[in-house]
Image: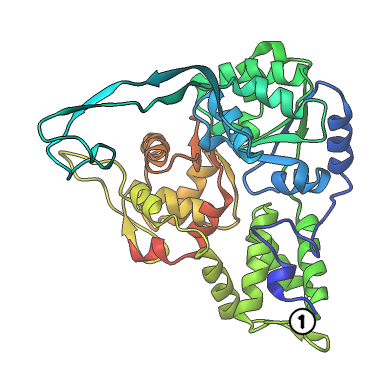
Amino acid sequence: MAKPTEVFTPNDVPTFTYVQRPVHKLEDRLREAFEVPKMIVSISGPSKSGKTVLVSKIIEPDNLIPLTGSTIRSADELWSNVLQWMDAPHSKSEKVGSTTKFGVEAVAEGKAGVPFLAEAKAGGKASVGHDRTADVTRNYKSDGLQQVIKEIAHSSFVVFVDDFHYIPKEVQEEIGRQIKAAAEAGIRICTASVPHRRDDVVRSNPELRGRVTGIDSGYWSDDELSQIAYLGFRELNVDLSPNVVRQLVAEAFGSPQLMQAICLNFCFENAIRDALPDQVRIDPDFVTMQQVFERTSTLTNFSSMLSQLHSGPRQRGMDRKVYLFNDGSKGDVYRCVLLAMKADPPQLAFKYDDLLKRTAAVCLEDRPSGSSVSQALEQMDKLAKLVQEATVIEWDEDVLDIIEPYFLFFLRSSTHLKSIA
């Protein structure tokens, strides 16, 4: 019988809880895209939306060469990482000649000393007839792209560059030229990016237009996330009410990976270690559900970033204005914005006007002005990028995007924001 850790797999390709999402026909579209010769496939979708799982379902694990954009700092690194996955050498040696040493003379001080001069007289010299020939080799780094082409062109292998948007902008241009050459030579290439950076591949090299097939995985709907819960808990002989499933789905923010993690921690919190022998209805109370979410928040730690965003940038001179909030705490505009982001209903994107309404709603009396909120968001965007290399939040003067669902989950479900009040 299956265990919860086998059923709900936030860090692996799911077996029992894989959902095809037939409305989008993503599997068919991806399979067809890979069949087109010399075509680069670009998958876009929110963070933790199942892009890697989708590719892993279409391409056999032994044929998938997974790379991560955050580890690539040059075009050479891209191909050297591919060669490393294949256990292929990154450099070559060739013999260019040899050298011979002979006729060495040595002085002996008696029979003691160098063994092969034991018979030499004290103070005398001996000629050593010892010839030695050594090969002279030259080491040089191989052309990574050409070697990869030689090894896997026109094969079933797929080079999968996840988080392509994490590759530095100045490097993407050269990589764009090289993946174009690689695709034309018969290398199957697939990239994955977040939605607002979906065109990074084409922008890196305009000549790629018409050579890239874009597939948008999008956020998961509530019904699609519900299927993870229904499939998984059925496998464990656990019956959940639709209301409980809705609560789990509401905190997953369109992320199947987060949904898997919440369901797994639901099992842990309710002492479900194995599939139950008979079907049992579990209907947890509010406190238990909060414990499930708080436990799940420990899977990712954004405490340092949250503390930085809460403090804001260092400021000299005038103290910031303090506001009273409806959670019983008080703080400046930065805490106000975070409480607004945390408030119900949960959202991953906020238009400026909606965010202003939220900041007003969390305040008891006075509220920050629009210009104050805007300036705070601008500073929070900068601070977030300094604290963590991966993009977590992004502000563009009109819309606030929470790129990382786990950050919103941590903000809402951990006790950290309360502790730093």
Quadrant holding the N terminus: bottom right
**Between 18 and 305, which is closer to the camera in this rendering?**
18
- Residue in view at x 37 percent, y 34 percent: 375
- Residue in view at x 49 percent, y 34 percent: 395
Quadrant holding the C terminus: bottom left
Give the image's coloring scheme: rainbow
Please indicate whether residue 78 sits to the left or right of residue 277 in the image: left
Please indicate whether residue 19 sits to the left or right of residue 92 in the image: right
Q: Position of residue 284 (x, y in %)?
A: 66, 81
Q: Position of residue 360 (x, y in %)?
A: 45, 49
Is residue 98 something that shows in the picture?
A: yes
Q: Position of residue 64 (x, y in %)?
A: 73, 41
Q: How many marks?
A: 1
Mark 1 element type: loop
Please indicate whether residue 319 sits to the left or right of residue 231 in the image: left
Q: Which residue is mark 1?
A: 275
Label 1 crowd (10 A; few <14 / some 14-19 / many >=20): some
